[in-house]
Image: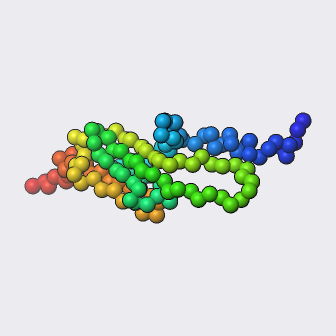
Amino acid sequence: MRSLSHYRVPGLLRVFDDLNHELQNGNGNVYIPDVQIEKNDTTYRVTAALPGVAKEAVNVEVENGQVKISGTYPEVAESDFKTVYTEKQRYTRFERNLRIDENKFDVEKVDARLENGVLCITLPLKENLQPRQIKIN
């Protein structure tokens, strides 16, 4: 039986790197960021982690029943080390599309902010769909 030290570390790490979310297309690798979706009585909130990405490199669109998040990652500087044991996939672009019911949301009031590498998109519900308190006379 071979000991664990017999196996080359780069081969073992590569197995875990293959589990990354990626989509192969003609333009290279596109990363699909994970999102968290939350809701309260008046708003839906979508958050996505985009570490190292400047807000100028992010595009958010609401169109044809979808919220489209896309953009580019900054270039990675070349390493001055001579031997590289493992190299993580370098993504140049990211893209995520989420279907929404445009009849439920006030698309003119959708807001997006990128702070500390976290993109936060708020989608307010139309006022006629928000719960309201009825005064009893």
- Residue at 73% across / 50% down in the picture? 85
State the quadrant of the N terminus. Answer: top right
Residue 116 picture location, percent across and down? 46, 64
Q: In front: 95, or 128?
A: 95
At 25% across and 46% down in the image, what residue appears?
105
Q: Which of 28 and 32 is in front in this view?
A: 28
Res. 101 visible in picture: no
6 sits to left or right of 128: right
Give the answer, above or below, for where 12 lies relative to 137.
Answer: above
Residue at (43% x, 60% y) in the render: 54
User: Is residue 127 among the parts visible in the rendering?
Assistant: yes
Dividing the picture into quarters, in which one does residue 56 lie? bottom left
In the picture as drawn, the residue positioned furthest to the bottom comes out as 116
Number of marks drawn: 0
Classify the position of the C terminus by image quarter: bottom left
State left or right for residue 18 relative to residue 68: right
Residue 23 pos. (x, y %) = 51, 37
On the image, the x and y values in percent for residue 63 come to: 28, 42
Looking at the picture, how far across and down is residue 24, in whole percent?
Answer: 52, 36
Please identify the residue farthest to the left as the structure is shown: 137
Residue at 68 percent across and 40 percent down: it is 15
* Placement of 46 over or under 18, stated as above or below: below
Residue 64 is drawn in which quadrant? Answer: top left
